[in-house]
Structures are given as structure tokens and as C-alpha cells.
Amino acid sequence: MKRLISQIEIEFKFSNGSERNYLLFSLEKVGLLMKSGESRLHVNYLFAKTYEIRVVWSPFIMFSPRSILITGASSGLGRALAISYAGEGVTLCLTGRNEERLFETVREVERAGGIVFWKALDVCDAVALQNWVEELERHMPLDLVISNAGITGSHEVDGAVETAETAHAQIATNLGGAVNVLTAVAPFMQQRKSGRIALISSLAGMQPISDGPAYGASKAGVIAYGEAMRDHLYKWGVSVSVICPGYILTPMADQFKSWRPYEYTAEEAASSIMKAIARKKAFYAFPWQLALSIRIGKLLPWKLRRLANQRFNYQR
């Protein structure tokens, strides 16, 4: 019988039978061919030592957070995530810089049955963000926090390089904002020994385009920061997911015209991200076609990779 599993329990039996280690992993779409709920096999582990492994399947249980904080919720992907998570019994804590647009998101979430706490603020303001998180935590523990706020920029039309001001603004918001969010919420989750954090990066963090140097640098920083924090917070039972979307049809992305293969709507991207968070994916890059092409491209000589990347530059 082929069963779809989400978790496996691995039991290591040492050759002398005196010790056992148990590990629990979350998986996505893993099919095991087994006659019952348990299967035994032998594998060669480190230094060719043989261990017996017991694999036990268990059904997938969808993650259903009751209190969620989302930054950058005034439009685009942040709004789509807020509306997708909205529902009866769910409390959404939403923030964004544009108060008018943020309130539009609040109204849509309320129409979907969600309870909303909201505040217009800039994630670059670490003190304001910290104070708001502390206020929220006095009312309820945050189950899930999604750091989504971001801005973009580019070189001048005449070819003059992206200004330092434009570059620093992107780094402060995209990377600095993620740092401010995580450092504000992580201590509370560490105390509870539970919680999930998702940092929205980008495929541009894996492979920047020449027309968006600071944007790519800021998103690469989010990847590095998120991976390091994931390892650090693991011992407290706090999971960190680094999400790298490709092209998404949003007002921010629409500022610059370019070739945009495999483009997602904001709603489609939100659905994919929700599934990745629910499955505690450590790193999720999509669409897979672009993510795979980036990984393969890293093996190519720089000049060949540059020729391929030029297709993604902005139309001037």
C-alpha cells in the first residue's frame, strides 16, 4: 500500500543494542511502499556502520495558527496572505506603512470573519515595532509571524548606478526590517518553546539581476540571517522558514517592466507559502523551474550566466 506521510520517526539501533536515538522529521509528499504502518530497513550510515531504521508513518496535520502577525500587509503579497489566513476564530495582527491601504486590507479580513489588530508603522523603526509586539503579546501569544515588508529599486534610466540612498533604503527595509521583526518576536516564542517565523526573501537573493543590486543583496541577507536563526532557535522549538518567491503580480513588482516567466498572482503565491509554512519547510524557493535554473546556472562560467541573466533586466 502506498501511503502519503508527513512525518517519520527514525529509530537508530546501535550494533550493541545499548543505545537508541529518536528523530522526528517533517516531510512533504513522501510516498512509502509498505504493507503496514511500519517498515524496517538497513542503511550504511557514517563510516559504513550499519544501523537498523524503523520508519513509522503518520497522517499529515495541517497547521492552523490562531494568532498571526504579518508585516507589509497593506498591499500585494502581504494583503493576499492576510486574506488567505482570515477566518472565524483567527486573529490577524497587520502592519504596513500606508494607513489608508492597510485599512482596506483590514476591512477585507473582517469580512472574511477574522479578528484584526492593526497599526501603521515602518518596520525600520525597531522601537515602534518592539513596543507593538509587546502590546500584542500581552493580549495573546503569536503563533505565526510573517516578515513580508519590502521595497525595491534600480539604477537610473540613463545608466547611472543606483544611488546609495536607494540602496540603503532597500537594505534597511528588506533586511533590517526582517531583523527587527524576528528579534522582537523570538524572545516570546523562546519562553513558550513554540512558534513559527517565516521570512520572505526572493529568488533574487539566490541570483540577483544586474538592474537590482541592492534588492538582491538585501534578499540574500534575509536568506543568510534566516538560516542562521533557524539553527539557533531550533533548540527552543521555534521554526524559521525562509521563503524565496519568484515573480509575483503585485504593485511593487509592477514598477519595473521585464520578462517575468512563471509569474504567480499574489493569491497563488500566498497559497504556496501557506503550505510551505504549514509543513515547516526550512527553505522554500518557487516556482521550482526558476529555482532549479538558478542552481544549475551557478555551475556555469560567469560570462554564460551573465548572458542568461540579461533577459531578466528591466525594460528601459
Image: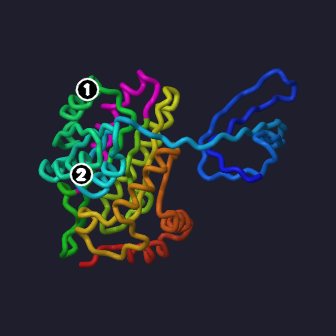
Percent of width and height locating residue 97? 17, 48
Q: Is residue 64 above or below residue 21?
A: below
Q: Residue at x 26, y 38 (%)?
A: 115
Give the number of callouts. 2
* Type of amino acid under label 2: Glu
Look at the numbered discs 2 and 1 and tell me whether their residues touch, using CB distance below 8 Å.
no
What label does residue 134 carry, if any? 1
Decide which of tag 2 and tag 1 comes sooner along the chain. Answer: 2
Q: Residue furthest right?
A: 16
* Type of amino acid under label 1: Glu
Whether residue 107 appears in this view of the structure is yes
Q: Which residues are magenta?
A: 167-195
Colour scheme of the rendered structure: rainbow
Q: Which residue is label 2 attached to?
A: 108
Q: Is residue 79 magenta?
A: no
Q: How far apart are the two marked residues, 2 and 1, measured between alpha carbons?
A: 26 Å
Q: Residue at x 22, y 37 (%)?
A: 117
